[in-house]
Image (cartoon, grey):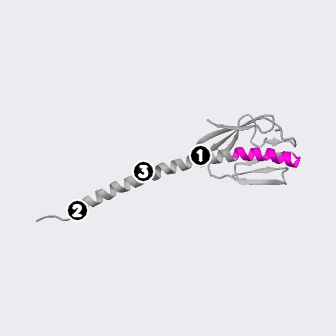
Amino acid sequence: MTQNGYSLIELLISLSILSLLLIIPSVTLQSTFHSEQTEYIAYQIKEDLLLAQHIAITNGRTTSVYVDNQQNYYTIRFSTTEEYMRRAFQHDKIMFSAVTMGINDISFLPNGNPRKSGTIKVMIHDREFFYTIYLGKGRVYYREL
């Protein structure tokens, strides 16, 4: 007697191998997505710091950045009651902390110069980014450690 077709065990083994081959790329793509998302968030924070500086120059008013780690947002504002922009943290695992200046010491004078220079640290996921504000216009840099 001849056999035509495959046994149930052969089909199960084939399907399990195929499912493993399909899962591997999705895990790799997911880690790449988190890395790109983290890079984007870090870049967006730098651009928002520069935006605060440009708003100070454009409006001729002192402009500051206020960070609230508990409520997960930061604002660009002229005073405690007058906000220009509010941005919610784009991920749950973002934390601002002081290094050589406080997280709420970021402020730009009407001519665009920062009131203080220094560095703050931002944790995004499990990566650390250091933002340094230098005296002078347009001098906000960030780097990852």
Lateral position of residue 126 relative to residue 49, left or right: left
- In the image, residue 93 lies at what x, y percent? 62, 48
Q: Nearer the viewer, mark 3 or mark 1?
A: 3
Residue drawn at 87 percent across, 43 percent down: 110
- Residue marked by disc 2: 7
Which quadrant of the figure contains the N terminus? bottom left
- In the image, residue 56 lies at what x, y percent? 84, 46
Which quadrant of the figure contains the C terminus? top right
Up the image or down, 8 lies above or below 108; here it is below
Residue drawn at 28 percent across, 60 percent down: 11
Callout 2: helix, strand or loop?
loop
Q: Amino acid at mark 1?
A: His
Up the image or down, 103 lies above or below 81; here it is above
- Residue marked by disc 1: 125
Mark sitting earlier along the chain (3/2): 2
Q: Amino acid at mark 2?
A: Ser
Q: Real-space Cα distance between discs 2 and 1? A: 47 Å
Callout 1: helix, strand or loop?
loop
- In the image, residue 103 lies at what x, y percent? 74, 42
Mark sitting earlier along the chain (2/1): 2
Residue drawn at 13 percent across, 64 percent down: 2
Crowding at label 3, few (<14), some or many (≥20) Cα neighbours within 10 Å? few
Lateral position of residue 133 relative to residue 37, left or right: right
Crowding at label 2, few (<14), some or many (≥20) Cα neighbours within 10 Å? few
Q: Amino acid at mark 3?
A: Ile
Up the image or down, 4 lies above or below 47; here it is below
Mark sitting earlier along the chain (3/1): 3
- Residue marked by disc 3: 24
- In the image, residue 67 lies at what x, y percent? 74, 47
